[in-house]
Image (tube, helix red, strand yellow):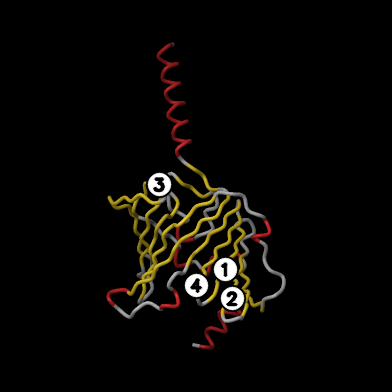
Amino acid sequence: MKRLRFLAFGLMTIMSISSYAQKTISEGTITYDITIQPKNNGAKASGNLNGAKLTVYLKGGLSRTEMTSSLGTETTLHNSKTGNAAILKEYSGQKLMITLTREDWENRNKKFNGITFENSPDTKVIQGYTCKHAIAKLKDGTSVSVYYAPDLIAINKDYSQAFRSLPGFPMQYELETAKLIFKYTIASIDLSALAISKFDFPKSGYRFMTYEENKKGRSEED
């Protein structure tokens, strides 16, 4: 009986330590610094994107991501419960809001469907977290390389379709285009409470367009 009690106590202690070590993000602000470099010694990256930042705001199933640079700001709002989303573009004094249904959101992110990450032996300490390295190849031939913290978990897995299946929080990652590599590195994590109004969809001040209208317009320009 004493042995059983000892084993039970030991198991509870291990579970307690494990739960204490792992931190869950249900709400907070995460800021990434962005650096851009040419791929395979190609053309130089645009100087207009130097100093760009990505800020992610999370509150339950709501998310808001803002990419800011000297060119302007692009914001994505998403409600994981309804599936609705909006993209706000503010460039050169022009303000455009593109609305997305759940189906539009899935279509926009379909390149990440079925994404899986394969761990490598590499590790790195970022913001005090020991991070594992993983890499994935997408169907379109591009790749995603990421250092993630297994001890930091976001409740809302839908804020980023690229990292929905990642077993931890992305602390540093690289996304490739045909000519450039975008490297995102966490600069700060603030788990303070956020106002619900931070995630409201604007009702005025923007030129409104549906996702399908925007796709059609871009096709006609091409």
> Residue 76 lies in what quarter of the image?
bottom right
Q: Distance between the residues labelled 4 and 1?
A: 12 Å
Earlier residue among tags 1 and 3: 1
Q: Distance between the residues labelled 2 and 1?
A: 9 Å
Element under disc 1: strand
Badge 4 amino acid: Ser
Q: In which quarter of the image is the N terminus?
A: top left
Q: Residue 140's spot in the image, x, y percent?
A: 38, 71
Badge 1 amino acid: Thr
Q: Residue 51's spot in the image, x, y percent?
A: 44, 69
Residue 208, relative to residue 188: is it above or below?
below
Q: Are dots 2 and 1 in contact, CB under 8 Å?
A: yes
Q: Residue 44's spot in the image, x, y percent?
A: 34, 79
Q: Distance between the residues labelled 3 and 4?
A: 27 Å
Earlier residue among tags 3 and 4: 4
Residue linked to disc 2: 90
